[in-house]
């Protein structure tokens, strides 16, 4: 276990914000090369420490990272972004990632044999032991880029949400950091033989992030892949690292939809690709991507302001459903919040029928926990030859629970009928509750944790607009939170609970009375398993 302590005084050599990175080959950075990096990232980053698990030593973050001498993973820009965003903080990264490893067994903390989970803890133990004796550290979060191998069968894909939830809970417990932030890198789009299982794991990752207040999801389906259609390119790895840094700092939009405009995948000839719709789980009918042309859409001759070929589209491809009842659905990385009004908008295309059966009708649904919160009813009578925006709204109540989701349905019609969808958007608007730093509708101890973890940040972005408005995250935000503790609405009465006081080390930081110290002990837990 990692032990926490408070200093009474005296100088501290270094206080490290320590981040873990685990997963399989897209965490490793398979087949990347430092020549693709800008010059500053090719050189050692002297203000970011990286633990080389191969030789058991700490050094500046640089390409190589204990793997291939010229390769890198998302750590290369994750560390750089954190250091740039948090001047004065000392960033350290410990990585253990192994290609072609699954979560159901090889990373499973409950597996009886020694596995990659045990080796992750061993690597962290070695890293802690290798720190200079006077240095201190605190584990600030973990990054996870894994899941490709768990798409190998329907049972492993179906078990992914349960297994990932257990993994996160166990690693927090074993590290003694029960509220540790956890960033999940969603599976990138890939062309493989496992197309039916891929979106199941993607949606499981979204659901896990939605149901865990301290977890977040990084979408990757828009990132470029290498020629094997599986591994992220060197450029994609750089983008992934920046997004992970944004996620750990609370800057990502949890209502973001994976592949909202169905640009991935698109066939080289721009025709329908019915095999895969990345990020979406398919059911029934013939479903794929479609490039509208003048024969189907009357104004498809030029790109519009959204970069689409028809008004209300975004991009050059749409989702196409033909034949009998068909649908796609997606789980988001956000849980439904009571008091929030959600607005779902979808561009729906009615092809110019030219005397054929044409448009069968459509329905759009907003989900929570897999249950329908509201739907549009049957959508019919749209204008031929164009896309039309259709919206539905819903204000969540106290009884609504679970991960948000979206379902798009093509109604059963005559042979040859078709429905197209594009540009899926979900917005959420709620009254800001002062002191509700995590946006869950209540001012409680979890908001104190959010404040504590972001104390000293130069802006209040991580406080969901519920801070004091004074600029950075500081003592004024704590004072506001304390005065609002126990409320669950703009004018709700206090619940009568006692207000938690800041830990002694935080009071010391605020009052500058002593140096803050997070003491460490040697690793005392036996290998887990």
Image: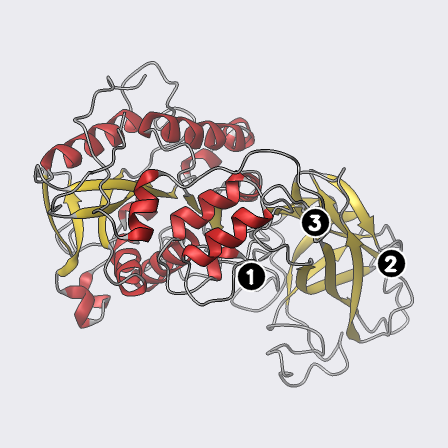
Q: In terms of sequence position, does the residue under pointer 2 or pointer 1 come before the other? A: 2
- Judge from the rendering whether residue 82 lies leftward or rightward of residue 465; answer left or right: left
Q: Residues within 10 Å of mark 2 (few under 14, many from 20)?
A: many
Q: Does residue 227 appear left or right of residue 288 in this picture? A: left
Tell me which residue sits at (17%, 51%) in the image: 49
Inspect this view and state whether residue 219 appears: no
In the picture of the structure, the residue carrying the numbered disc 1 is 465
Residue 64, image x and y in percent?
A: 15, 52
Q: Is residue 83 above or below residue 187?
A: below
**Looking at the image, which residue is at 41% across and 32% down?**
178
Q: Sequence-wise, which precedes: disc 3 or disc 2?
A: 2
Residue 502, image quadrant: top left
| Real-space Cα separation, disc 2 to disc 1, in angstroms | 44 Å
Which residue bears the numbered disc 2? 360
Q: Residues within 10 Å of mark 1 (few under 14, many from 20)?
A: some
**Rendered position, 197 above or below 31:** above
Mark 3 burial class by Cα count in 10 Å: few <14, some 14-19, many 20+: some
Lower sequence index among marks 3 and 1? 1
Q: How is the image coloured?
A: secondary structure
Left/right of residue 374 with respect to residue 514 in the rendered view: right
Decide which of 481, 80 is in the foreground and name it.
481
Q: CA distance from mark 3 to mark 2?
A: 44 Å
Q: Of helix, strand and loop, which one carries label 3? A: loop
The quarter of the rendered structure image containing the C terminus is top left
Image location of residue 338, percent across then percent down: 71, 46
Per the model, the C-alpha gap separating discs 3 and 1 is 15 Å
Q: Which residue is mark 3?
A: 489
Report whether residue 29 is seen: yes
């Amino acid at each position: 276990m990692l032990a926490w302590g408070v200093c009474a005084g005296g100088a501290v050599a270094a206080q490290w914000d320590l981040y873990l990175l685990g997963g399989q080959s897209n965490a490793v950075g398979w087949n990347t090369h430092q020549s693709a990096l800008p010059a500053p990232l090719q050189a050692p980053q002297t203000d970011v420490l990286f633990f080389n698990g191969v030789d058991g030593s700490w050094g500046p973050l640089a390409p190589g990272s204990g793997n291939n001498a010229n390769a890198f993973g998302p750590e290369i820009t994750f560390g750089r972004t954190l250091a740039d965003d948090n001047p004065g903080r000392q960033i350290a990264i410990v990585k253990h990632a192994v290609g072609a490893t699954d979560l159901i067994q090889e990373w499973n903390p409950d597996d009886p044999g020694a596995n990659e989970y045990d080796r992750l803890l061993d690597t962290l133990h070695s890293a802690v032991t290798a720190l200079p004796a006077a240095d201190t550290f605190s584990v600030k979060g973990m990054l996870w880029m894994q899941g490709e191998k768990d798409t190998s069968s329907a049972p492993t894909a179906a078990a992914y949400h349960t297994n990932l939830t257990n993994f996160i809970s166990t690693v927090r417990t074993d590290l003694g950091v029960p509220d540790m932030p956890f960033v999940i890198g969603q599976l990138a789009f890939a062309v493989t033989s496992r197309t039916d299982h891929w979106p199941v794991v993607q949606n499981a990752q979204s659901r896990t992030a939605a149901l865990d207040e301290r977890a977040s999801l990084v979408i990757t389906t828009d990132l470029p892949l290498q020629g094997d259609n599986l591994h992220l390119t060197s450029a994609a790895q750089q983008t992934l690292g920046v997004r992970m840094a944004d996620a750990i700092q609370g800057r990502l939009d949890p209502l973001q939809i994976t592949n909202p405009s169905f640009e991935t995948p698109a066939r080289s000839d721009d025709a329908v690709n019915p095999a895969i719709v990345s990020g979406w789980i398919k059911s029934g009918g013939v479903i794929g991507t479609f490039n509208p042309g003048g024969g189907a859409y009357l104004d498809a001759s030029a790109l519009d302001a959204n970069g689409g070929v028809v008004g209300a589209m975004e991009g050059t491809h749409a989702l196409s459903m033909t034949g009998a009842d068909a649908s796609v659905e997606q789980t988001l990385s956000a849980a439904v919040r009571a008091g929030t009004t959600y607005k779902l908008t979808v561009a729906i295309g009615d092809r110019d029928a030219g005397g054929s059966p044409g448009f069968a009708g459509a329905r759009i649904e907003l989900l929570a926990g897999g249950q329908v919160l509201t739907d549009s009813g049957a959508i019919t009578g749209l204008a031929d030859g164009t896309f039309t925006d259709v919206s539905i709204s819903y204000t969540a109540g106290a009884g609504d629970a679970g991960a948000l989701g979206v379902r798009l349905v093509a109604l059963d019609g005559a042979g040859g009928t078709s429905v197209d969808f594009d540009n899926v958007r979900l917005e959420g608007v709620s009254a800001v509750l002062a002191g509700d730093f995590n946006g869950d509708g209540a001012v409680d101890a979890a908001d104190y944790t959010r404040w504590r973890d972001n104390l000293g940040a130069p802006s209040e972005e991580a406080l969901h607009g519920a801070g004091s408005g004074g600029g950075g995250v500081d003592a004024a935000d704590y004072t506001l939170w304390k005065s609002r503790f126990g409320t669950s609405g703009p004018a709700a009465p206090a619940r009568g609970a006692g207000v938690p006081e800041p830990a002694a080390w935080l009071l010391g930081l605020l009052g500058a009375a002593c140096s803050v110290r997070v003491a460490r002990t040697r690793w005392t837990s036996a290998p887990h398993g």
